[in-house]
Amino acid sequence: MKTTCLCAAALFAGLAAAQVPIDQEPRHHIEFANDALRVISPQIPPGDTTLEHIHMRDETTICIHGSSTRGKPHDGEWGKPGMSCVPGNAGLTEYTGKPRSHTVQNVGSELFRLFLVENERESGWQNNPALATPGLKVLRENRSFRIYDADFSGPGPIEHVHEVPAVVLLVAGEANAGAKKLEQPGQWTLVPAGEKHHVTAAADARVLEIEVR
């Protein structure tokens, strides 16, 4: 009986060791972190496979560059390869209180790149009202995030203020977010809560503003 228990304990320890926190997964590049949020850039080259990694906090992911991928949940089987994500497509997942681990493999021929924002709150997400700023439209939202799509076909969004921290992300084209010039897809800037800011861009640019609630 003692030998059986020791074997089971060793097996469990091995499984736990096989899973790494997201910030220890080499393809998930931590670009910024504070008490409120983390900005992460997952990049998986063609034919590459991540380590099995754990998602612990609510997060939003924005597609920057697509490639066909497949995933394998912990103790599960590989899923079927999916179609390449479309740049700008946004996903919202509530992992806080329900952590999950998985492995991702890039089975396509292009770099798979996401933009990931993690909300570090364990509870007490802020129920702030959506902005009524012309030129900003709510794209998606949940308890932890509200994502706005900026429209530059006209004058563009006027100067405005978010009640919570916000990340301004360039998906396509070029833009100016305050004093910062965003020139490549995936570039971003953080706007502190309560700070006035103004984003300008050409009509063909794509910019998202992500409130971290």
Image (cartoon, rainbow, N blue to C red):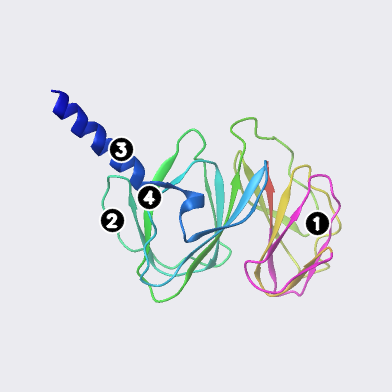
| Disc 1/disc 4 C-alpha distance (Å) | 40 Å
Callout 3: SS: helix
Which residue has dot 2 on it? 78
Q: Nearer the viewer, residue 4 or 44?
A: 4
Q: Nearer the viewer, residue 66 or 37?
A: 37
Q: Earlier in the sequence, mark 1 or mark 4?
A: 4
Which residue has dot 3 on it? 13
Residue type, mark 2 in image:
Trp
Instruction: Place residue 184 in its image quadrant.
Output: bottom right
Q: Is residue 45 left or right of residue 198?
A: left
Q: Residue at x 59, y 42 (%)?
A: 142
Q: Earlier in the sequence, mark 2 or mark 4?
A: 2
Tell me the number on the disc at residue 134. Answer: 1
Asked if residue 90 lies in the magenta stretch, the reply is no
Q: Earlier in the sequence, mark 3 or mark 2?
A: 3
Q: Nearer the viewer, residue 173 or 190?
A: 190
Residue type, mark 3 in image:
Ala
Q: Which one is closest to the eye, mark 3 or mark 2?
A: 3
Tell me the number on the disc at residue 102. Answer: 4
Quadrant of the snapshot with the C terminus: top right
Q: Residue furthest top?
A: 1
